[in-house]
Amino acid sequence: MATTLITDIATLVTGEIGAPVHRDTQVVITDGVVTAIGDDVAAPDHVISAGGLSVIPGLVDGHVHPTFGEWTPAQNSIGWVRNYLHGGTTTMVSAGELHVPGLAFDDLTPELVTSLAVTSRHTTGRVRPSGVKAHCGTVLLTPGMSESHFDRLIEEGCQHAKFIFYDWNHLPSGEPEQYVEWARERGITVKMHSGGVSRSGSSRVAGYDLVSAVGPDVVAHISGGPIPMPDDEIRQTIDELPSAVEVCSSMNYRATKVTVDRLTERDELHRLTLGTDTPGGTGVIPRGMLRNLGYLASVCGVDPAVAVAAATGSTARAHGLDVGVLDVGRPADLLILGPITGSLAEDVLDCFALGDLPGIAAVLVDGEPLVLGRSEQTPPPTKKVTWR
């Protein structure tokens, strides 16, 4: 067994809402899994000194649009997943492989969308580009699918489905609700595009009436992707549906505050999940998840530890994933980070409260240091990590 001890951690945030923030602590990792927090271990194989920096779970981007490996035709960019890793993202969830060249959104068939999801799952989703846990193979739900299509999806390891280009003229038939039922019976999470049309122009406008009729597990970019449903419908969605609600970097900033204020009033911030909704018209944003955290804590008044949970454990839970929380028995996906030169912050929670970008010194996935020393996407933190 390989054991790593991370010492000299000034602040550790678990990613679980309601869990205490640990101070002056250390973490033991054995074979890629957290085996202790606060305890020591004799003769570890590796020791990482966090040097007084903070530790949080690796960020879980709940809304990405991969295509082939690390190339995205949406921005004609190569290497974007590696850049997101350096921005702190250790897990990402596909919201549909939309940008495959030649994919006709107005001519999707059940066999095409199922085959595309399976292919994505067994190519990009299999290789873990740049070490990121990329959950690819999200099926784009289309009319005419049968229960056998859902059987095939789950047999091939596809865990997610999305309504975005669905023809809502089929709503009275009850087909969408049937899809949700079939998906849930198989443990497939259903996400639904909400708000105005996407960059493609081919998605359907979806406000409260449509969202409530379908009842998805996750309401995608409720505050804009790029534009949201009306404010009253945002509030109604939060008030009357149990779904998780998602905020993305492509947000309408005002509508995000409407969303967060309502969740706060209802004491339901555990329903808040985060993503970037990239690559796409918003671009490629390696620091998108960090920007989400800063906005939530500094402008929307969310407790920084709760904001971290939204970007980690809450997003993972909403998508049925066993990541995003630092606890015994959980995967050792984590960031070591802290204030950069010029910041008034004392630790990473202060950074988010001030709206400051933190500097990332290390990124570990399953206990393996994929970034060590400093990130290529943030300035260096004021304190250094050492490895022996």
Image (tube, rainbow, N blue to C red):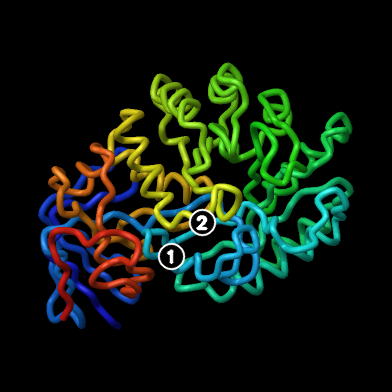
User: In the orientation shown, which residue stands out farthest toward the top?
Assistant: 232
Q: Quadrant of residue 155?
A: bottom right
Spatial separation of the CA atoms under disc 2 and disc 1 = 9 Å
Residue at (53%, 37%) from the top-left corner?
244
Side of 6 relative to 175 (left or right):
left
**Camera-nearest residue between 383 and 318:** 383
The percent coordinates of residue 240 (x first, y second) are: 59, 21
Report the residue marked by disc 1: 83
Q: Position of residue 290 (x, y in %)?
A: 36, 49
Q: Amino acid at mark 2?
A: Val
Q: Quadrant of the N terminus?
A: bottom left
Question: Splitting the image into 4 quarters, where does residue 193 fall?
Answer: top right
At 89% from the left edge and 48% from the top edge, which residue is drawn?
144
Quadrant (top left/top right/bottom left/bottom right) for the C terminus: bottom left
- Residue tagged by mark 2? 284
The residue tagged with tag 1: helix, strand or loop? helix
